Amino acid sequence: MSETRHNWTKEEILEIYNTPLMELLYNAATIHRKHHDPNTVQVSTLLSIKTGGCPEDCGYCPQAARYHTDIEGNDLMTVQHVKAQALRAKSSGSSRVCMGAAWRNVKDGEEFDQVLEMVRTINKLDMEVCCTLGMITENQAQRLAEAGLYAYNHNLDSSEEYYKEVISTRGYEDRLETIDNVRKTNVTVCSGGIIGMGEKAEDRAGMLVALSTLNPQPESVPINALVAVEGTPLEDQTPVSIWDMVRMVATTRIVIPETQVRLSAGRTEMTREGQAMCFFAGANSIFAGDKLLTTPNPDVTKDMEMFKLLGLNPQKPFIKKMQPESIEAENSQYQPLGEKPKWSRPEHTIERNLEAKEKAKAIK
Ligand code: SF4
């Protein structure tokens, strides 16, 4: 088995990314077969448990309150609602439910307690539970772990340099700190990014440097193609080509060999042939369900048809790591600390955010 390296340089990764395509595909597929069953793909269902009204300024996100999109916001879902959705996801082949809340960071209190109850409920359905709730402290990560959380998602989005062009309300180091807090528990890390935001190949390589040099490397790496939503600062971005997507998947597979490479947003724009090429290049996870938080996603029956056509099988839960135990709230070892962590607010502005602000004012 090839050894996992934690010292990749940007130059080395760029060289891989720019390898002639057939050679790149062959190299990635070879590494993929050494570490994974090439006919198994993990299926996750992404559930937006609290939509819209987010105070952050992520340039790609229709849930940021400051942009003028037609997203309908809603308050935190009830535990019963989440349970019903999880059961539906399970019956259609999903082994994991990922719950996303449009928060800057987690705050101790009733809402977080409700999320912890959701985690316990889904874990008891024998499904892997993942959350993406924004920045979290170590104590909050421990409480999630105790409730039975299997994975925590916190994307790096892009290279450290390009990140500043897309987000100004928090820094790259805050992202890394949250990942580090999750790493102090037995919860696995899911972290990846988005291509097609106007970044260069160097930035894509830069993001993979940041992810591959983490030790251990993330257990899951989502690769998203930007879904340019009207009203966001990135609404006019040219859609990313399938060739870029395949190159990114293959390069990720080579530099982070043991991870589950997750084909995420942007699949509606991809043909089955394109997706098949991504699976060949090492993608071994998809998000199912007709929505990815707020953007469209292929219908799950269509996905299952594609699986049949390609001879792929959905992965069973807890293949990579044992199912965690769920400790009930009354037996918890961790108390809410009511911390007010000083997550940074970098002092830079992004020109296109200013333009979006002006546009929003003009619409009003
Ligand atoms: S990506 Fe997350 S943190 Fe950023 S604006 Fe959207 S919901 Fe908020």
Image (cartoon, grey):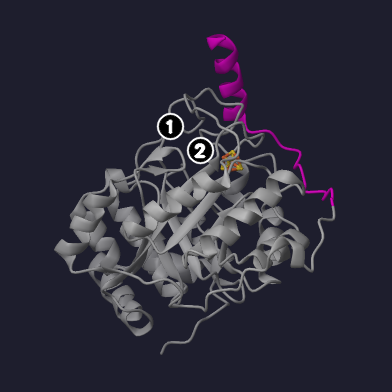
Q: Is residue 319 left or right of residue 208?
A: left
In this rendering, the answer to whether 354 lies above or below 41 is: above
Tag 2: amino acid = Tyr
CB-based contact (under 8 Å), mark 2 and mark 1: yes
Per the image, label 1 sits on a secondary structure element best described as loop
Judged from this view, the residue extending furthest toward the left is 309
Mark 2 within 8 Å of ligand 1, using the beta carbon: yes
State the extent of the magenta-drawn residues as a range. Answer: 338-364
Q: What residue do we see at 41% from left, 55% from top?
A: 87
* Distance of label 2 from label 1 (alpha carbons): 7 Å
Residue 155 at least partly seen: no
Tag 1: amino acid = Val
On the rendering, which quadrant does ligand 1 occupy? top right
The residue carrying mark 1 is 229
Percent x, y of residue 206: 54, 60
Per the image, label 2 sits on a secondary structure element best described as loop
Percent x, y of residue 300: 28, 51
Percent x, y of residue 364: 57, 9
Q: Is residue 62 left or right of residue 329?
A: left
**Residue 60 image label:** 2
Q: What residue do we see at 50% from left, 38% from top?
A: 60
Q: How crowded is mark 1: few (under 14 residues within 10 Å), some or many (20 or more)?
A: many
Q: Is residue 340 magenta?
A: yes
Q: Which of 202 and 166 is in front in this view?
A: 166
Counting residues from the start of the chain, the first of labels 2 and 1 encountered is 2
The N terminus: image quadrant = bottom left
**Residue 111 image label:** none
Q: Nearer the viewer, residue 137 or 277?
A: 137
Q: Is residue 339 magenta?
A: yes
